[in-house]
Amino acid sequence: MITPSVDAQLDGFFTRPADEGISLAVVVMQRGAVVAEQYGTKPANAFEPEQAVDADTTLISWSMAKSITHAVIGLLVADGRLDVGSPAPVPEWRGTAKEAITILDLLEMRSGLHFVEDYVDEQTSNCIEMLFGGTDPSHAAYAAAQPLDHPPGEVWSYSSGTTNILCRIIGDVLTGAPGGDPAARQQAVERYLTERLFVPCAMASAIPKFDEAGDFVGSSYVYATARDFARFGELYRHDGVTASGDGERILPAGWLDHARTKVAHDAESGFDYGRHWWMWPQFPGSLSCHGYQGQFTIVVPDKELVVVHLGLTPIDFAPAVRRRLSDLVETY
């Protein structure tokens, strides 16, 4: 079998039938340098006209932001301000069975809290209600109020609500207390993300978004260029050391392995899950950020490789995009 060239493989993302979805950006970074990239066209919508995407275009992360949240937790661990083995400091859980939930349980998506992660059916989706329903200005408060379906630490259940609980904890740590002025909370977290993560990683384009309570919506909302998402992948490829391993250590030593410690296997997608990161079993030692509509940042340390795909792919066609990405990784 003859393997198509990288150029031909990239073309394949952008020439697939439109009803199978649209690729907006593919970037391949190897040994810290961009070795291949291609960009598409973002279609017009109700808010903006058609837009040609290029290396400077910021695009939404969706759930790839969850892995960025893992990095922020790592920064606080490195600062000595969080212990992931300790009970999650959620005020409304005091005196209830939920107070047994640890920060690690949240990172592993094993809180035991009820949460339906659905991106289509708004009648059954806690995710849609939390992000768009306007039920609570605090996404974390909405998620923290969900009933406990299972004992903490026992059952894996992927949940954007879980991530936003972590993000409120981040805000509490950085401001010194729960609640407070939303603008002040946002400013404190935004400054920390910028100074401690985005600037050291040379992610100049990164824009985090916040809820009305002033907390980072780390489940879903970071905008950045495809190259900057790749630079985030590089941080993990080098176990938390910036500048492709030649800079400063900003995450705890071993944070890469912390992220890719297998917690569960998702039979529907075929991927393993770690701690706010996914793993591709066909690439041992890999880890990956995944987001709705086909957002991927795949890190394969053994190949010194990071591959980013950003697009608008319907869920039914996600397996086809994953196969294309797998073939692209295999080329290197």
Image (cartoon, rainbow, N blue to C red):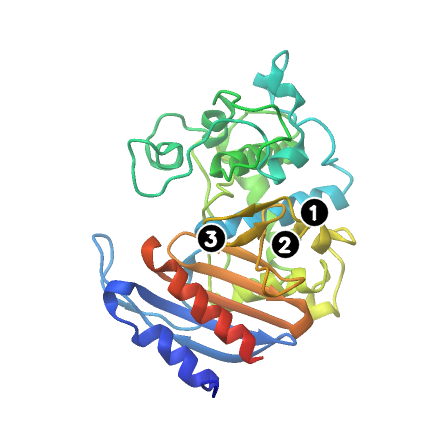
Residue 283: image location, x then y, percent: 61, 65
Give the answer, above or below, for where 35 lies relative to 299: below
Q: Position of residue 273 (x, y in %)?
A: 58, 48
Between 169 and 258, the residue placed more toward the observer is 258
Q: CA distance from mark 1 to mark 3?
A: 30 Å
In the rendered image, residue 313, in percent from the top left (x then y), is placed at 34, 59
Q: Amino acid at mark 2?
A: Leu
The label on residue 213 is none
Amino acid on which disc 1 is placed: Leu
**Among numbered discs 1 and 3, the one appearing first in the sequence:** 1
Circle 3: residue type? Ser
**Front of the two marks 2 and 3:** 3
Q: Which mark is residue 197?
A: 2
Query: Can the viewer see residue 204 in this picture?
Result: no
For mark 3, give the secondary structure.
Answer: loop
- The quarter of the displayed image where residue 310 is located: bottom left
Image quarter (top left, top right, bottom left or bottom right) of the C terminus: bottom right
Reading the image, the residue beneath label 3 is: 269
The residues bearing labels 1 and 2 have C-alpha atoms spaced at a distance of: 8 Å
In front of the other: label 1 or label 3? 3
- In terms of sequence position, does the residue under pointer 1 or pointer 2 come before the other? 1
Residue with the mark numbered 1: 75
Query: What residue occupies the far front of the structure in this picture?
Result: 1
Dot 2: within a 10 Å radius of its alpha carbon, few (fewer than 14), some, or many (20 or more) residues? many
- Which is more toward the observer, 227 or 237? 237
